[in-house]
Structures are given as C-alpha cells and as structure tokens.
Amino acid sequence: MIAVFRALRAEGHKLLTLPSARLAVALGVLLPAGIAALNARSPHWSGGVDAGFTELGVGGAIGAIVLGVVAVSSEYTTEGEESAATRQIAATLTAVPARLVALAVKLIAVGLLALAVAAAACAATFTAVHLVRGEPAAAVTAGRVLGVQGYLLCTAWLALAVTVLTRNGIAPMAVMITNVSVVSMTYLLSQVTDAARYFPDVAGPHMFLRDVATGAHVSPVTAGIVTVAWVTAVLAPAAAVFCRRDA
C-alpha cells in the first residue's frame, strides 16, 4: 500500500510538471469562464437556468479531454520538452511493474486533478457571470455542480482510455474536441435516431443541464449511469490491451 501511495505521488508530480497538462488546467478553468463572460455581455443573452452551465459543458470538457489525452500520450512521445531520451512508459513500468496498478494510479491522479479543475472552473464561471451581469447565475445548486464534476471526470477518463488504446494523442484529441465544440456528429445523429442520444457527450451534459435542446428527456441519474457505462466499456479493453502489449 505504501508503494501505491508513493507511485500516486510520483504520478501526480509528473502530471503537474507536464506543460501540456498545465495547459489543460488553464483551459479547463479559463475557457468556460471566458466564454460565459462574453456570452453574458451580449445584449441578446437571456440567461436562464443553464447560464454558466452550458459554457462549463463545452469549455470544461475541452480541458478535461486535453488532460486525459496528454496524461497518456506523454508516456509515448520521444520528442519535445515532455519526452525523455526514450519513451517515458519504460521508466513508468520499471517503477510500477504491475500494469493494472500503474494504470489505476494514472486514473486516480487524472481523476483528482480533473475534479479540482472542475471545482475551480465552476467557481470562475459563475463568478464571471455575476461580475458581468451584476447578479448571480440562476439555479446554481450543489447537485448541479456535482453533475458538472462527474461529467468532466468521466470525460477525462474516457479521453485517457481512448488514448491508451491508440498510444497517440493527436487523433483522440482532434476527434473529441471537435465533437464537443465545433461539429458534434453524435448530436446530429441524435436528431436521426433515438439511440444516438445515449452517446456520452449527448447524454452526459444532462447531469447538470436543465434546458437542453437535444429533445432527449434523460434524468440526471440516468445520464450519469450512461456516461459511467461508456467509460467502463472503453476502459476495460484499454486495460486489457495495456497489460498485454509491449511497452
């Protein structure tokens, strides 16, 4: 157990020293707050029950995706300031030979940081709305804030699991960020078939959004269960592949 705590401390230190991880933290906190401030300044801004929460669902998710991806992709890079002379994964598995333990430690480290970033993002975003509009963001409750944290945690873990499968961060980051911010293919599919409404990026935001335009009536609890199921479904084969293939 002491060895696991030492491994977790080392993993957390390694994660916090990555420039790309620090960028992910900055994006996760500042992007939703900045978008919320810009939206609140608009004369056409109507506020509503999802004021601030909508921005957290987009800007916060981008930060969570970057965090989950770089936590794994940095292990396999051999170029740039985040790399060692050889791939970092060799040193990681030398320090923690049990691969499931190594993966669990990384999941915990990323999860704790994702939760901290989500909490800071909520505070910054609702403060930005308050400062710009001169009134608090509407309908901010502890349950909805917990929903944001759960969604961003699952998003970071999902990005991590996909990157474990690919061992390259470019494709997962490009596809996932595009899907939550620019052109959501899953949202478009949800307009065609009801089954697509249960993709994680469509169902997940129902954990905290109350006035969504997807047409899918998913309760916060159901949204949470669906999102966790997606994380589990991707993480299970990722763990199996991580344990079996060469470093």
Image (cartoon, rainbow, N blue to C red):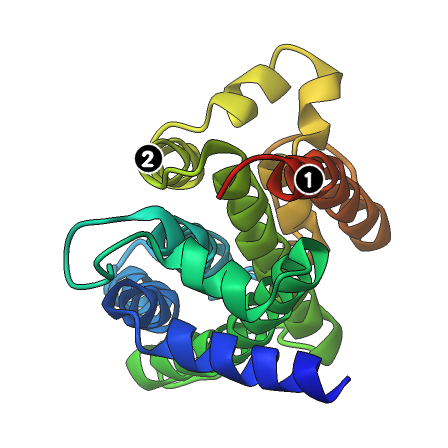
Could you say where residue 96 lies in the image, as x and y percent from the top left? Answer: 60, 67
Which numbered disc covers residue 174? 2
Provide the secondary structure element on which disc 2 rests: helix
The answer, for residue 188, to whether it is visible in the render is yes
Could you say where residue 82 lies in the image, as x and y percent from the top left? Answer: 23, 62
Task: Specify the amino acid type for callout 1.
Answer: Ala
Read off the residue under disc 1. 203
Instruction: Tell me the quarter of the picture where residue 60 sits.
Output: bottom left
Please report whichever mark, 1 or 2, sits nearer to the chain's N-terminal start.
Answer: 2
Horizontally, residue 139 falls left or right of residue 76, namely: right
Report the residue that reaches farthest toward the top. Answer: 192
Could you say where residue 125 lies in the image, as x and y percent from the top left? Answer: 41, 74
Report the residue that reaches farthest toward the bottom. Answer: 2
Which residue is painted at 16% across and 63% down in the image?
Answer: 81
Q: Nearer the viewer, residue 6 or 94?
A: 94
Estimate the spatial distance between the alpha carbons at disc 1 and disc 2, rounded to whole Å.
Answer: 21 Å
Could you say where residue 10 lies in the image, as x and y percent from the top left? Answer: 49, 81
Task: Specify the amino acid type for callout 2.
Answer: Ala
Which residue is painted at 44% across and 40% down in the image?
Answer: 180
Q: Is residue 88 above or below residue 29?
A: above
Provide the secondary structure element on which disc 1 rests: helix
